[in-house]
Image (tube, rainbow, N blue to C red):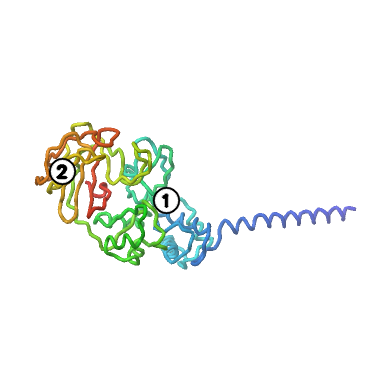
Amino acid sequence: MARSVHRAKTVAFCLLFVIAAAVVLPQAAVAAPVLKEGMTGSSVKELQRRLSEWGYPVEVDGRFGPLTKAAVEKFQKERGLAVDGIVGAQTWRELEKSPALIHVVERGDSLYVLARRYGVSIADIMQANNLSNDVIVIGQKLTIPKKAAAAAASEGLAAAASSGQVYQVRPGDSASVIAKKFNTSVPALAEANRLSDPNRLRAGQKLIIPGWQANIPRLIWPVKGRISSPYGWRIHPVYKNRQFHGGIDIAVPVGTSVKAAAAGKVIESGWMDGFGYGVVIDHGQGVTTWYGHNSKLLVKVGDRVRQGQVIARSGNTGVSTGPHVDFRIKVNGETLNPVYWLP
């Protein structure tokens, strides 16, 4: 009888062990799948998301292509791992370590403010959080890349931004359209931005334009104030729909002196519909600066102005919800983010 009880206990224990193994082993396999070039799926997306958090510029598209492999190899090399481009248990363990800090958005925060505070670029923060525009909300949690990790990822974009080589994708854009606009090729565009598929662009995405130089003069701020609405996609404060904002809104009291950001020739001065009373200055080589929503204009078309000259008094004219200056920079008709160019 005792032998039968012992045998039953042994069988029960073995069954429990088998069941536990059946439950635990598959979970362990799922937690750390071995990934290599050519694979696709959600595990590859998770890999790409973690690489992005570490500051490596990869597309989170779920396809383990040559660019993802190159990022894995660079990560392995920098972490002292065997460099084979294959993501095994050891590489996963390193990827799962926290590369960044988390910032909870507070009133008054903007990507510009956070980038200055943490010593990284706006592009670093946007990439780490997979943001397609500059809009953030109070309470939102943002991953802030470590400066050391982010530096490698943003080096190309930061250098490009300083020479005017950054373009923000708009609805309807395609790689071929952008390449034609800037006299480059789709392969060159893909290589410069490490795009696994240049035909899959998203609105708001920032692209380096290889070989394009914007000859923008050294600028000064037209007014000193808080940026109340940044460059990029936003919900329009009046029309309540999603629109691209091609400049920065600088909040200042009505009547503030608006100064020319650089020397040039006035090519527009007057009523400009939603832009209100505006001034446009031509600085040569396709570069223009725009100043909108003024209450009074102090220059006329044809005037030559010097840098720092007062050209208008700020206001609240046109389509506006409060006194501010809408400041824009255009190169050959394409807007650039002014924060890259102002001191």
Residue closer to the observer: 41 or 54: 41
Coordinates of residue 62 in the picture (x, y in percent)? 49, 59
Q: Which mark is residue 130?
A: 1
Q: Residue at x 19, y 52 (%)?
A: 287
Residue type, mark 2 in image: Ala
Residue tagged by mark 2? 260
Indicate the secondary structure of the residue bearing disc 1: loop
Upstream in the sequence, badge 2 or badge 1?
A: 1
Q: Is residue 254 left or right of residue 9?
A: left
Instruction: Report the residue that reaches farthest toward the right.
Output: 1
Coordinates of residue 120 in the picture (x, y in percent)? 33, 49
Label 2 vs label 1: CA separation? 36 Å
Coordinates of residue 185 in the picture (x, y in percent)? 31, 66
Badge 2: residue crowd in 10 Å (few <14, some 14–19, many ≥20): many
Residue closer to the observer: 100 or 316: 316
Q: Residue at x 63, y 58 (%)?
A: 26
Q: Residue at x 19, y 56 (%)?
A: 215
Figure label count? 2
Residue type, mark 1 in image: Asn
In the image, which is nearer the foreground, mark 2 or mark 1? Answer: 2
